[in-house]
Amino acid sequence: MPYESLVHHNVTWVNITVPTADDMARLHEAYPQFHPLNLEDCLNPNERPKLDDYDDHLFVVVQFPLWDKVNRISRPSEVHLFAGAGYVVTVHNDDLKPLVSLFGECQSDPKARETYIGASAGHLLHSVLDHLVDYLSPILAKIDTKIQSIEENLFAEDIRRTIHDISFVRRDLIALRRITRPQLSVFHSLEHEDRSYIKEELDVYFGDILDHLEKACDMIEEDAEVITSLADTNDALASYRTNEVIRILTIISVAILPLTLLAGLYGMNVSLPLEHRPDAFWIVVGMMAVVTLAMLFVFRYRRWL
């Protein structure tokens, strides 16, 4: 069912997955204090992270990365939360594993239900956000693994594959930065502003989430700097290899020029030296060989080879 609820110790957790207009109507009937515009936001994804404060509840929009295997990029998955005295409402698209697993664990395990729901709605809100932020760690760990792989293969011969890997990781880091950075203000507000309907002192708890999120943002920035440096190094290596190929081709072209000149001269329909000698062909070939060896000696002496 897309509309589910858990009640434990006077705390209610309503979880709505893949919301519809009927779900929002049912939610508005159960909680008439919710603003219609916030309910409309739940049906319209791609909202920027925000926090709306009301007298008796708050409305939070947060986004967390979801890996797109086809396009190899992190996409934002949106979660809408309502929190007030004795209740928390989560609205999402059922694709964020930490949120889905947390609700499922609370449904099936009485100990988990007591741990996460039994204390208060404020603690439940903290637990939901904490699980979502902690899920950034394995995502960043995978990126670190990819960067290490790129570092190991940086001097390999397959430059095209290295360029592709660097480009995909750089694009993914840009997407992660766009997802995580705007949410710092939301968690900063949760930490520093007191609300009458959340009576517990949760500043330290929300501050811990903010620290984790800031650390994740710092890791993303560091990884972005590293991948930029690797891209610059790879570009330098590619330029060096290209220059080496051009240098060799230039030497070959210059070495062939005298041979082309001699072949062109003796291909002319005019009187030329040695034309009446029976061994003229081998003499011309010998002259070409001497000229080529002399040029290669000069190239070697000037350390062009």
Image (cartoon, rainbow, N blue to C red):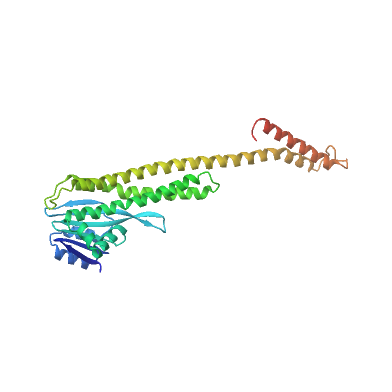
Q: Nearer the viewer, residue 204 or 34?
A: 204
Q: Residue at point 47% right, 47% down? A: 150
Q: Where's residue 83, x and y in %?
A: 17, 56
Left or right of 197 in this view: 62: right
Specify the quadrant of the image occupied by residue 31. Answer: bottom left
Q: Residue at point 38% right, 48% down? A: 173
Specify the quadrant of the image occupied by residue 18. Answer: bottom left
The reply to whether residue 96 is visible in this rendering is: no
The reply to whether residue 22 is visible in this rendering is: yes
Specify the quadrant of the image occupied by residue 125. Answer: bottom left
Left or right of 233 in this view: 293: right
Q: Where's residue 1, x and y in %?
A: 25, 69
Count of numbered circles in the view: 0
Q: Residue at point 79% right, 37% down? A: 287
Q: Where's residue 226, x and y in %?
A: 41, 42
Q: Residue at point 36% right, 52% down? A: 139
